[in-house]
Image (tube, helix red, strand yellow):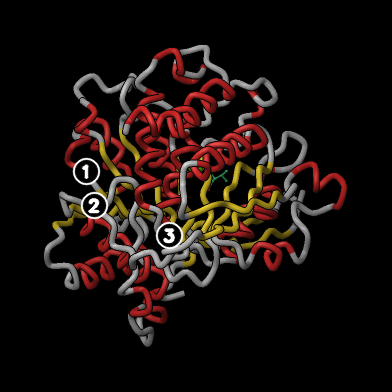
Amino acid sequence: MEGNDWNTGCAPDSASADRSLQTSVVQSRYPPATNARMKAYRIATIPGDGIGKEVVPAGREVLEALATTSSTFSFEFENFDWGGDYFRKHGAMMPADGLAAIRDRDAILFGSAGDPHIPDHVTLWGLRLKICQGFDQYANVRPTRILPGIEAPLKRCGPGDLDWVIVRENSEGEYAGVGGRVHQGHPIEAATDVSIMTRAGVERIMRFAFRLAQSRPRKLLTVITKSNAQRHAMVMWDEIALQIAKEFPDVTWDKELVDASTARMINRPASLDTIVATNLHADILSDLAAALAGSLGIAPTGNIDPERRFPSMFEPIHGSAFDIMGKGVANPIGTFWSVVLLLEHLGELDAAKRVMGAIEQATANPALHTRDLGGNATTAEVTKAVCELLGPSARRKAA
Ligand code: IPM
Ligand code: MG
């Protein structure tokens, strides 16, 4: 496949030009919320597997605690028991018409997909990627910063020095799912996974990332690439970055090779702010980012359809964590921060700020640190504390 074949004929993605996403680290640029009266948001919860079954109910509790203090919104939850157990009963991770069942929700709160007895590619493609790709949630947003009270591993890095948002291309690239396997078990066996990049796909994620960078105080974007080695798709990626940059003259941007960016994240964390990368590059960098911020247990994600044709999906990035599942010790903070992203996506910015504030108060208290943070707190204790920090009594105290 020659790069040029993909280089022509696609109009810029202008449909998304006026809409934007903000995360807990970004100023709001949403259209004003129209919910002058009580609005009931319809949320699909999909705990999935492993500790997803523990942290998603905790996230729901937090949303419910929040709703008790609001006279403008409430939540209607419906739970979907899709995942490994469903697979054992029905031979699929979710029903064939599953997407249609959640299509009209305002948002999805997801736990994780992964089961010790089912191959990872089956659980992933049968549930999480089916939803991400089925709903064209092409922008995966991963804010990372060092929360109060969290001990992060970098010696020379204070909390203000690490404040990033990683934008992960979420619909194509190395996760396109294109490839095949032949002659299985024979010496001549061959297998391919083909990374597909389209002009439309790259333009829309670049535009999204530049807009997000523009909405943050530093207006700074780093475009991660590997165009020295990958001479077709990544060269197109670079060219499109240069093209989209012209639409955002107030954004300062640079380009960094993915391997070099790992060293930069460690040695010069403050030189980064918003970061955009391909599906696989950002997958890897975001785990590094989460570890540098103190724990994978804290890190949130939004799988966003910026055009709002479909519901967006919010999840902690930690995965199923079989080693601790069922013990009640999972860190629910990654889910709570994902709830913050969910609320921002709904346009409930004050509510999002309140939840973020409660999270920060919780992390600042070492007695509320779970095992991944070196503490002994349980999922239930952290959840109760965050709910109390949000509840009517907390409101009264603040007033
Ligand atoms: C993530 C995860 C997933 C991914 C796994 C669970 C397949 O690592 O959300 O980063 O690679 O996308
Ligand atoms: Mg990952």
Q: CA distance from mark 3 to mark 1?
A: 19 Å
Q: Mark 3, residues whose alpha carbon is within 10 Å: few (<14), some, or many (≥20)?
A: many
Observer able to see residue 235 = no
Q: Locate residue 89, reporting x and y percent.
A: 87, 47
Q: Residue at x 23, y 52 (%)?
A: 222
CA distance separating discs 3 and 2? 16 Å
Image side of residue 13 versus residue 44, left or right: left
Mark 1 and mark 2 in contact (Cβ < 8 Å)? Answer: yes
Q: Which mark is residue 139?
A: 3
Say left or right for 299 vs 175.
Answer: left
Q: Dot 3 lies on which element?
A: strand
The x and y percentages for residue 343 are 44, 51
Which residue occupies 30% across, 67% down?
Answer: 207
Q: Amino acid at mark 1?
A: Leu
Q: Note whether ligand 2 is within 8 Å of mark 1.
A: no
Q: Which residue is mark 2?
A: 222
Q: Earlier in the sequence, mark 3 or mark 1?
A: 3
Per the image, the residue denoted by label 1 is 272
Query: Looking at the image, which residue is at 69% across and 47% down?
Result: 123
Q: Amino acid at mark 3?
A: Ala
Q: Nearer the viewer, residue 213 or 255?
A: 213
